[in-house]
Each structure stands twice: as structure tokens, then as C-alpha cells.
Amino acid sequence: MSNSAEAGGTPARSLRERFPLLTLIFERFLLSLLLLFAVSVLIFAGVEALPGDFASTYLGQSATPETIANIRAELGLDRPVVTRYFDWLGGVVQGDFGTSWASRNSVSEQVGKRLGNSLFLASFAAIIAVPLAIGLGMLSVHFRDRMPDKIINVISLAAISLPEFFIGYLLILYFAVNFGIATFPATVYEGMGFLERIQTIALPTATLVLVVLAHMMRMTRAAILSVMSSAYMETAELKGLSSWRAIVKHAAPNALAPIINVVALNLAYLVVGVVVVEVVFVYPGMGQYMVDAVTVRDMPVVQACGLIFAAVYILLNMVADILAIVANPRLRHPR
Amino acid sequence: MRLREIPITAWIGLFGIALAIFCALFAPLIAPYGETEVVGGVWQVADGQFFFGLDNLGRDILSRLIYGTRTTLFVALAATVISFSLGIILSFIAAVSGGVIDTVFSRFNDLMMSIPTLIFALVVLAVLPQYLFVLILVMAVLDSTRVYRLGRAVALDVAVMEFVEAAKLRGEGKIWIIFREILPNTLSPLLAEFGLRFAFAILFLSTLSFLGLGIQPPTADWGGMVKDNKDGIIFGIPAALVPGSAIAALCICVNLVVDWLLKRTSSLKGGRGDA
Amino acid sequence: MPDTNLLSVRDLKIEATSYPPGEQPKRITIVDGVSFDLQKGKVLGLIGESGAGKSTIGLSALAYGRGGAEITGGEVKLDGTDILKLGKGGIRKLRGARICYVAQSAAAAFNPAHRLGDQVIEATVKHGLMSKQEARRRALYLFQVLGLPSPESFGDRFPHQVSGGQLQRAMTAMALCSNPDLIVFDEPTTALDVTTQIDVLAAIKQAIEETDTAALYITHDLAVVAQISDDIMVLRHGKTVEYGPVQQIIETPTQDYTRALVNVRQTAREEAADQSNPLLKVDNVSAEYSNGFKVLHGVSLHLCKGQTLAIVGESGSGKSTLARVITGLLPPSEGKITFEGKPLTPALKNRPRDDLRRIQLIYQMADTAMNPRQTVREIIGRPLTFYYGLRGAKKTARVKELLEQIEMGNGFIDRYPAELSGGQKQRVAIARALAAKPELILCDEPTSALDPLVAEGILKLLMKLQEEQQLSYVFITHDIAIVKAIADSVAVMHRGRLVRFGPKSQTLSPPFDDYTDLLLKSVPEMELGWLEKVLATRRMESAGN
């Protein structure tokens, strides 16, 4: 304790001491960039270093030394690794992910179309899931250890045990096949009307919401409970404040940072959930694209999709951390 | 601990797990038909003879389900055991050593964790040859990052306790400190985490198989069975939902047991040790 | 005549349900049959060891049960109305308006997200007692009375921006803001350093007098409560031991327990005459943390065989750090340490096993110093195996012998630490140190977490062992009374520097340096009117300057 107090008194007040908030945010941003760079190396090197020659895989039965050499030259595999990495990275920075080995089409073009679809689906699910999860979490805290809380606990425990595809097919069987009130497969195309689009993605959205809801709700409950058990909440009660005021004025500002964290963590989870859901519903998004590419070992596509998924994930985590930093009064109001 | 204190939910969970293990061990004895044996028409509906009906190739779903228990349990368990050993050993070494070792391990772990597990697995499995041990290793290594994070946190909690310092002052070596001082005090949370990771491994394996990257046909496994029969759904044939339900049921059972373990851990706080 | 009483408590009974692991939940009684009266403007001190139920009684004046405690019997009357029967809405109107609470840890009790000023006036404004402007003026007045720095702008700060002593005063201001009839002070100075405590104590006393508020003052320190109370109630295990005017309790206690509390540690020991032949010599030692923060500045001192060196200082003075440097946990950045004339290896990991054996450490918290998963046999037995290779029956015999030495029977040999009381745990910790047959034992506040009577027993045990086995102690403490009782030589530390060192008689006699003077004067004495006397001296001194 006295340690930090005395350390604060050292003569040279650095940038960090004068603008702790800005410095921290900047540091967090740099860290994300660094991570992103490291991830790109990891993905590229992983693909390079692992066994299996793509040219021979690519040609299959018809491989002769000659054709393999040809194809290696054509795909640029005969150049040194480092050169190829920086070529690839240079392209990525400019939005060029190269050419698909399977279809010989531009990867970027496909990604451009599909990324929008995936983000649309994920954010639509998030818009529904986040308020619902926080609301249920609060409800659970309000009825802590009583019947509604116990019911929510058991149901959410069951829900986190269900695989995405199981929920998906269950919904398809009932809502699309048996009752005929939803569409399957969820095919969207350019120029589709907004309402029609939403109707089409109703089932995949519902699946994603169900997948992410239970996790988010359980974590929200834990976050709020830890705030509610702190000493200043007892102070609020002993001041004779109404429980409404205690929650809004005293609990909420402190619960904000942990809840933001919970939400971001689960949004990142959503990004991954989208892969399976897209395959189930034959939805033309990034997940579907990546899984298809993995099956035929179309490496430029796999690399591109892997990097983009990782980037979204890193970005979400960064936003969460920065919001949590901003929500911390100690950093907003330095000594 | 008396048996009567185990709540009913945990009993359900334990029973489910026991049933799965029983099926896995005695699959050839219980299963009415062979794993890959074609016994009738495609997607033949359930009747007295075929309890869950037949699948997309006319194989008995119940038999494949029982054989699938073997594959699914074995792969998930193997992956969890490896991932756990790896994660715990590395995290405890990091926690006890501190300094450079801790920093290097932890930064590398952060890097691994900055790529979503499924995405990482897709990238790696796209490159690696499709062998069973490769699949298990990939699952284990990816999952060990999560174990590492928890293991390090738990070990650090204990490692800063004064009785560990007292052991260091006595001159005890790292092995004694890890296995005699720290490990006994972290068993409960680690056991619960093992359950959680196992449930996750089942889900993860099923997902990979469902995407066609896990267990390769014709070996039966639950995720793969969903993939095989998914096309029937459009015709209202629920064959894909049977293995799906099995996955869900087993995971629920594991989670019920974990929930009980976690509650026991938290009620242990304030009891022996943390008072 | 109950009519003249502001607060009247009768036959209070408070229970809670505990959930021991692996057993059926059971009801435990925390407070049983406690009754007292409090007149307007008077202060009642509630005193007792931890677990005596004093905080629980204090909170019952707000009809509040902490952590599942329930008031199951008796009545708590405020101006003749039983507040336990008021219902939620009724009691809420009283809390923060007529009855206020000051918590032990103000740092945790203030909301980190709001400014202090807003929190201080919140209850007063929300209860409609004052307008926002009036409340702000009142807060400013209270900040002045409580001696807070720059009172005009103090309210604009956030809790993390002010010191612990200031927070405790701000909490008092918060309690006083609504002009309450009664304030419950729950150990308001316990978490503070002794030199800060006296200021806060004085501020609270002055504020209570100036506003004519009644108070329940809860503490474990009889000397503190003697300065501020009109009446005192001594509690033990949830029951009243003795209840009477402060003068009677301090000067003519009728119960043995109270007498023990008043007379604790009046057994002083003569210091050793010859202090010239050092066993341990610390020579110009400095130390810093890995982040470069310097915690010790050129400390030199020594200790002779069979003697006790007491190191006194407040938290952050570096006294515990010095012990860590001697053990090798934190190697010194400069200087050297010699033991029996030979230099000690600075870092722990390079130290020969026999050097480790000869210096043992006893911690403040015996709870965390012993592995909860090991039995007493394993805890005491490990050093026997580790240093002397004892096993089997020989080891058991030696463990039993050690248990005899610490005055505990063989029956404890297979118990876990959780099955021992606080004092027993500390005895086992001492036995573990003895098992190594050390020459020097570093005692890091071994009694400060214990109740006074238990602490006294531990001190006596340590003294007995010293005589029997020619042990040397480095005894780290913040308690001057202990220093007076057991030390041969004394070192006073402040902010990582050695302020004063020498034989006890010399160190604790004038002429003093400024810090030692302040420290010695700040320690509350079991004497009525001590606080006034100190404050008067201070005023004279500052007038003289």
C-alpha cells in the first residue's frame, strides 16, 4: 500500500502517470496489433511447417514429379518461406487474400460477400441475446436461491450442454418441416429485402441465441452477485436507500465493467458458433466457406478465413478491455 | 462424505456417465447388430426390431449409437487426460518458477488463446493427415491452453500462501512443493475443471465430426452419425436427432456432476483450510 | 425509567445457520441475552475478542443482520418504539437518518464509482431531511470539524484518491450528516496505523461532542474505548461479562476476564546486561523489490545469543521486509548479514540446508502458514525427516515430545489445522520451528491476530522456551506493550529506515527523536483522560512553535 503511495512521489511524472487512461488504452491497442501479427505468423507458419505437400495432395493420383514441380511454381510454393509470408501479409493488408486453389477465384471477392452475411447473422443474434441474457441474469439475482433462480439454473445448465447442430436440427424439424412456419435452408442472396432476409435467418438466429444465451446469463448472474456482496452495497442498505436506488446508483456503475467483459467474451463465442450454424442451415457465410475449404485443403482460403475469424475475436476482446478500462473510476480519475 | 448428501441431480449425472461407460466397455455384447452391418432399408422407421430405426445406409441406429459411445468416450477422454496433464504440469511449473519461465509460457498461452479453438482446429486439421492420434493431439493441445490458464490461477492462489513459503524456507525442492503442498489444496477445483473440459471435449469432437473433420467413416461416432443422417431432417426423419440427443444427454450428466463438485468446493471454503 | 433512554436493548438474541462441510447445517447462537441502555448524547463502548458478537450487536441497532445473522429474540427500542417490529419500510426511514453506521473498512464501504461528497450527503437528501445545498453546507462544516484537508474541495474527490485515515473521517462525516440520534462505530480505527488512529479518534470524539450524538463504539482495544466512552460493556462468546461506567470497568473491574483485559502484559522482563557478543549481525543492509522500489535503506543492527530483539514500526515501515531479507526470501541489494561470525548466503536457494535449519520463521497468521491438508503429525514431522532423517516410531516420539513442549497433549497429533483454535495453531507453528532445533527464530507479529489472553499465553511460552533452549528471537511487532514486556534490545523502523536501535532501557527512554516520540505518544494507554492529555500537549507544542 505505502509502496504505491511513495512510488507516486518519485520526481519524474511520466506520461503514464499523467494520462493513465490514454496510456492504457494505447497499450491495449498496441498489444492487439502485436497479437494479430503473431497470429498471422502462427497461421502461416502452421500451414507451412506441418507435413503434407499440397501440390501432391492437390493433384492426387495424377501426380508426377513434373506436374508437381509445375504446380508448385504456379502456386508460388518454390520461393523461400519468408518471401512468401511477406508477400501474403502485404496482400492481406491491402485486402488481397490471393487466389483460391480449388476454384481459382479471388478469395477477397468471396470473403467480401460472405463476411457481410456472417456479421449480419451474428449481430442479429447478439441484438436479441445480449439484452435477454442480462435481463435473465438480473432476474436470477433478484430471486437468488429461490424457485425462479433454480429453474433458470437447471435450464441453462442443460442448454450449455447442447451442441449447436442439435439445437439447429431440432428447430428445423419442428418449425420448418413439421409446422412449416420457417424456411430451410436459409439461403440469402444479394438484393433480398430486409424483412425477407430476417425471416430467412430466423432459425439460425434462434439457434445462435440459444447457444450463447445460457453462458452469457450464467456469467452475468455471477458478475452481478459479486458486486451485490461488496461492502458498499451494505453501506447503501444501512443508509436506508431503497433497493431500486441501491441497484441503479450503486451496483450498476460497478457491475458495468464485468458485464461488458461477459458480453464480449460471449460475442467472441458467437463468432465461432456461427461456423457450425452456417453449415447446418447452409447459410452462405464465412463459416461455410472455411469448412468447405478445409475439406478440400484449399489453403489460401483457410488462411484467409482463419485470420479474419481471429481478427474479429481479437478485436472484440480489445473493445471489451478498453470499455472495462474506461468504466474504471480509478483510471478515469487518477490521484 | 456420506452418500445421502449427494443431491439427486448429481445422482442422475453419475448414473448417466456410468451407463455410457458400460455401453462403451461392452459394446459388442449389448449391440443387437454390427457397427457397419446393413440390416434393412434406408431410414427405415423404428419398430420392435430396430429400436431407433435405421440410418442413411440401412444400418441399425441403436447398434451404431452403442459402438459410437466407444469412439466418442475414448477420444474425448484421451484428449482431456492429455490436455489436463499438459496444462497442469506447465501451469504449475510456471506458477512455482515465476520469472522468465512464467512470462514465456503465459505469453505463448495468450497467443494460442487469441485464436478461437474451433478456428484453430480447422486450420490445423486442414494441413495434418487424418489419423485418430492426430485428432486427439490437436484437441488436447488446443484445450490445454484453457487448463493452463485455470491451473496457473489456482496454483498462484496457493503458491502465495505462507505454508508454501514456509516449505521454501525449509529448503524443499520444486517437486515436493508442487505435489505435496500445492496439488492437495487444488484438487477440488481441478476435478470440477476436468469434468467441464471433458464435457467440452465431447461437444468439440462431435462438432468436428459433424463438420467432417473428426472421426472418419465408417467408424461410428455420435457427431459423425448426425452428419450422416442430417439430410433426412428435411423429410421429417429424426434419425439425426438420436445421436444428437445422446451427446446432449451425456454432456448434461457431466455438467450436473460438475455443478455439484463446484458447489462442494465453494462450501469447503471457510471449512478446512480457508477459515 | 426507560423513558429517558434513547436506545434500550432487552434480552437480545441473534442466531445464524452455519454450514459445516460434510455435516448437517446447524443453528448457532451469536448473541445471547444482552441488555443495555443508552441515553441521548452518551457513548457506550462494546468491547470483546473477535467472535464475541460485538459487531452483530451494533448492527442490531439498525435492525440489520450481516451474513445470514437473524435477530430471533428480545427487543431494540429507539425512543420507546421497538424497531424490530417496524417492517422494511419503517426501518429504512430510520437508517441513514436517525441511526447511522461507520464501518471498519471505509475503503471498502465507499462506492468506488462516486465522489465522496455525493456519498456523504446522499442519505440525508434522499430522506428529505435537507435540500442538496443545505446538505453540502453541512458536509463542509463536518469536513472542517473532522480536520480533513482542504474541506471545500474534499467532497469532489473519489475514494481511491484519499488516504485510509481520511476515508475513515469521511465515513464519520457521512454518518453525522443527517444529524442522527445514534451512530454505530464498528472498529473505526482498527485498520489504521497507530499514529493515524489517534487523529481519527480525536476527530470522532470532538465531532460526537459537538453534535451531541449518542454512539455505540465497538472495538477490541480497551485502551481506545476508555478514551471515548461513558459506559463500557465487556462481551465474550456473545454474552455480557461486565457492564458499567467506564471508570468502574477500568479501575475496579469485578470479573476475572475484565481484570485480565485491563492487566494484560504487565509482566515486564529485565533486559540482558551483556549485549556485546552478536549472534546475528545486519550490516548496512538495503533491499528493493524487483520493480526497483527501495524498501530498506542501510539498516544495521545486531542480536546476541539467547536474547530478544524487538523491531517496532507501523505498516510499511519495512520491519517484515527485514525479516524476509534475513531469511533470504528477498536478497539484499547492498550490505551483508553475518550469523555466528560467518556471512549468510544472500539468496535462499543458494543457502546450505544447515543454515536454513538454524533460522526459522513464525508467521502472524498461523492459518495460512500451515498446509490445511496436512495433520499436526505431518506438519511438525516434516522438518524432523527433512533435517534429521527421522522416520517411523522415532519421529512420532519426537513429535509427541514437541507437543509436550508447547503444552499441548498427544491427542492433537492427528488433527488438521482447521480442527484447532487460533492459539493452538500458533503453538503448532512454534513446534514446527522448534523441530528444526534452530538457534534463531524470527517471529513476525505472532500474537497480533490472537485474542489478548491467548496472545499472553503464547508470549509466556516463547519466553519459557527461550530460557530452556537458549533461543534467540527477532520479534517483529507494532505493539509497544509487548516490546516493553519481552525485549532485550529494540529497533524502531519508519519508512524503510532504522530510526533508533539499542538496549531496551536506552531506546525507550528520552531524549527521543521525533518519530519515536510520536509513536510512543500515539499508543493508547489504559488510563482515563489520556487522549485529552495528549491532545493538550500537542496544542501546547504547536502554540509554542
Image (spheres, rainbow, N blue to C red):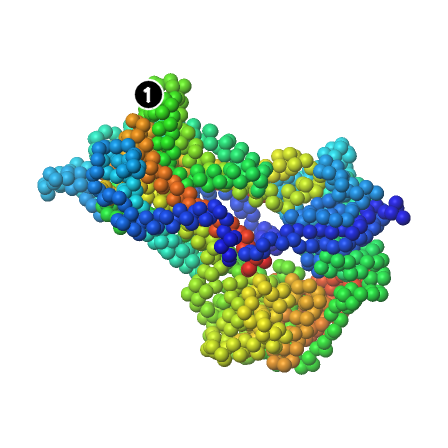
Residue A22 visible to an observer of this rendering: no
Q: In this view, does B32 lie above or below B102?
A: above
Q: Position of residue C146 (x, y in %)?
A: 76, 47
Q: Give me the residue at 36% from left, 35% from top.
A: A166
B222 on left or right of C354: left
Q: Where is residue A284 in the image (x, y as percent from the top left)?
A: 31, 28
Mark 1: give few (<14), some (14-19) or many (20+) Cα within 10 Å.
few
Q: Which residue lies furthest to the right in this view?
A: C1
Q: Position of residue B243 (x, y in %)?
A: 33, 39
Which of the 4 image quadrants contains residue B270? bottom right
What's the residue type where badge 1 is placed?
Glu
Residue that mark 1 sits on: A190
Residue nearer the viewer, A227 or A176: A176
Chain bearing mark 1: A
Q: Considering the numbered disc 1 on the image, is that residue within a helix, a strand or a loop?
A: loop
Q: Give me the residue at 31% from left, 49% from top.
A: B24
A315 on left or right of C271: left
Q: Is residue C31 above or below residue C124?
A: below
Residue nearer the viewer, C73 or A162: C73
Residue nearer the viewer, A182 or B243: B243
Q: Give me the residue at 47% from left, 61% from top.
A: B184
Q: Give me the residue at 32% from left, 48% from top.
A: B23
Q: Is residue B250 above or below residue C527?
A: above
The total number of labels drawn is 1
Residue nearer the viewer, C134 or B218: B218
Q: Position of residue C287 (x, y in %)?
A: 54, 64
C478 on left or right of B154: right
B114 on left or right of C298: left
